[in-house]
Amino acid sequence: MPFLTCLLFVALAWTTGMARLWAEEPAGAPPILIGLLLPPEETEATSLGRGVQLGIDQANQVPGAKFSLLVRGRVGQWGSDGEEAGRMVLDDHARGLIAPPGGAASHLALQVAGRTATPVISLCPDSSVVGAGIPWMVRIVPSTDDEARLLFSNFHTNPAGRTFRWGALVSIGRAGRETAKDLRQAGTVTSSPLDRPVEVSPKLQDFSEITKQVLATRPDGILIWLEAKLAGRLAKSLRAAGFKGQFAGPSHFQSPIFTTNAGSAAEGFVLPSPVLDPVSQSVAARFAAVHRQQFGSEADRITRMAYDAAVLLTDQLRKSGANPSRSDFPIMSEQPGASGRLKFDRNGNRLVSLELLQFREGGFIRFASQNVQP
């Protein structure tokens, strides 16, 4: 019998038994376990792992329950990651899960969460993650829809005075279909023409045909919504093929992985980024200093989001105390974070102000003309 199907039969017994265990947990109990689902093929695994571990370390400096981190992930079909998430909850007794940016892995974590009432903090930007209807989960990153709407709303006409038209590159398969759906939704809301997104295999090495395909419609701008390394290489290929229009993409391209692979093609690239209130700026500065001291490098956007995910999850588990972990969801309070204010609606959507940044002379700076979202 498939693993996820088995969960249907064990979920009720597990939830009842674990609730009794939590209620009886003594003061000197072992650390509360947090599970990080991290498939080996995840390109930003290092950033994710560092961010979550620093979040756990931060939680353990606060009086009260202590936490430990378990990382699992396995290459293979959808069922493999699902088994890893299930084992963390059913075998290792993880009290909460953190799911990676990839849509497939996040949805599998949510399937486990839905059957075992285990809270999940997801780093996946797909609207379908929140649409899964799991009341004890939140998406800690801005949605693709929100990011694309801000981009579209700032590019109305091309230099010739005609309506600005976008092309797009997305991943092949379900992940790309989810991204394309969100991009089309944003384009419809903002009345921004968007050509049919071109799907790209993550294993692609020769970009000549993809380049011809996306440039055939002569777009004014190209949305590159892929993992950071591949996106940088494709941007470089498109510039080499003669494209002189606007590049744009998601906020997680605030990363050396993207800028290093894009090279000179990163110049002028535009992306959304959360706006940090003054208190969050202080949190971000302290986090950056700790990251710099421990790893000798600057924290990228994914690392900051992963850190906030761990801090948020440990806070919620502390609040639930002897009650089931799901009891403090939905999250109606708010707090500062290294990635900005951590505030959510009742469905788990992060409510965050965004601004546009543009890469200029070696770094991302505030874009000159933009409409900042409330």
Image: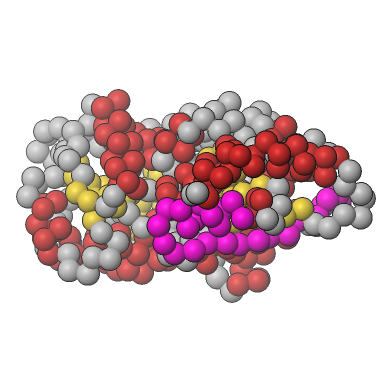
Residue in the foreground of this view, choosing between 178 and 345: 178
Total marks in image: 0
Quick check: 186 left or right of 130? left
Residue sticking out furthest to the right: 27
Foreground of the two, 118 or 273: 118
User: Measuring 65% from the left and 71% from the top, which residue is drawn there?
Assistant: 294
Name the spot of residue 240 as percent of width and height, x first: 15, 66
Task: Between residue 74 and residue 362, name the one nearer to us.
Answer: 74
Q: Is residue 262 magenta?
A: no
Q: Is residue 21 visible?
A: yes
Q: Residue furthest front?
A: 1
Residue at 70 percent across and 42 percent down: it is 14
Q: Whole-percent x and y of residue 117?
A: 65, 37
Examine the image and state in which quarter residue 136 appears: top right
Q: Residue at x 47, y 44 (%)?
A: 107
Q: Relative to residue 71, is residue 332 depicted above or below?
A: above
Per the rendered image, the range of residues in magenta is: 61-87
